[in-house]
Amino acid sequence: MPTPASIAGKPKIGQVVARSGQVIENVHITTTSGPCVVLTDVANVTIRNSEIGPCGSSGNVNSHGIVTIGASNITISSNVIHDVSTGAYITDSSHPVVFEKNYVYNIRGPFPRGQMVQTNGLKGGSGSSRITCNVSDAMPGTRHGVSHDTHNVEDHINLYETLGSSSARVEVAYNRIRGGHPTSNSGSGIMSGDGQVGSGWIWAHHNVITNVRNVGMAIAGGANITVENNRIYQNGSVIPVNVALYANNYSAVACTNAALLNNRVWTSNSNPLWDSGTCALLLDGGNLHDTSLNASMFDETPSACN
């Protein structure tokens, strides 16, 4: 996992419009206009070991670190992404897309952008997509030699109209997430299943979420979504919090086979779970009042990410 300190000093280049089969690595990509990296109708692209940002201008929703449109077989690995509207915006693309071991900070938004990573219409193709072993740090302060001073993050991870399969679930695992928007009440740590068409076959497990604004993790629709073995710590004296976990159907289609399994939660407002009854939720195991949890768990590196 790189950090802002370890990634610094790479050769600086401007916006990259990727070609199929391209490997983009060991550079510092920055631009004052638009996204830093654009992948349109391309396949088999890898972006790794690079610093990405600042990108575009503050207040511009299209100032992504990376944006894909109609892409497939994309790997984004071991980068530091900062000062962007959204770290990676994956739109109308096909599996597999891999976003792993990236360090993301200073997410600027504005809404509807404001994510470490958002998938929007990720489906089809072959193989499994995954969002694993990333750090999204929106807590104000100076770390790794840089200021984490912009935290207009909405959902750190948002899976919108994203569909895996029974044999190739979309995996969201071992991510460390903290902090949130200073004023918005619509954000969360990880949001899955929302949208007007089918979403599902998503597996979110072993993530650590600390002091995110509003909601820790949620199932907002879709089918065959499992949220298990996550740890969520929400302290209202640090940031306004609402609920740690919820399952509610905000989509236009039925929400079925939703499961919250063996999650550990502590929230200062004694509001660990909202189940609206619209997702046929299976709730099993875990501890929704786990007083052993604390904010320092964000600093623990999962062994699966070594």
Image (cartoon, helix red, strand yellow):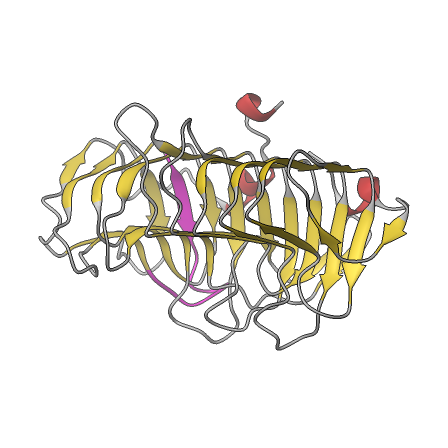
Figure quadrant of the C terminus: top right
| Residue 288 makes an appearance in the image | no
Establish if 106 lies above or below 6.
below
Q: Is residue 46 visible?
A: yes
Up the image or down, 252 lies above or below 294; here it is: below
Q: Nearer the viewer, residue 15 or 276?
A: 15
Q: Is residue 234 left or right of residue 280?
A: right
Image coords of residue 261 (percent x, y): 24, 33
Residue 256 point in image, percent of width and height: 13, 43
Q: Residue at x 66, y 33 (%)?
A: 21
Q: Is 212 inside the magenta-drawn segment?
A: no
Q: Residue at x 77, y 69 (%)?
A: 32
**Left or right side of 261 for 294:** right
Residue 11 placement, left or right of 218:
right
**Number of numbered labels in the structure image:** 0
Viewer-proximal residue, 148 or 54?
54
| Bounds of the magenta segment | 230-242
The percent position of residue 275, horizontal first and vertical second, equals: 16, 52
Which residue is more in the foreground, 252 or 301?
252
- Residue drawn where x is 42% and y is 26% of the image: 127
**What is the x, y in percent for residue 110?**
54, 73
> Residue 173 is drawn in which quadrant?
top left
Instruction: Out of 82 and 243, give the one closest to the viewer.
Output: 82
Quarter of the image where the N terminus is located: top right
The residue sitting at 40% across, 28% down in the picture is 126
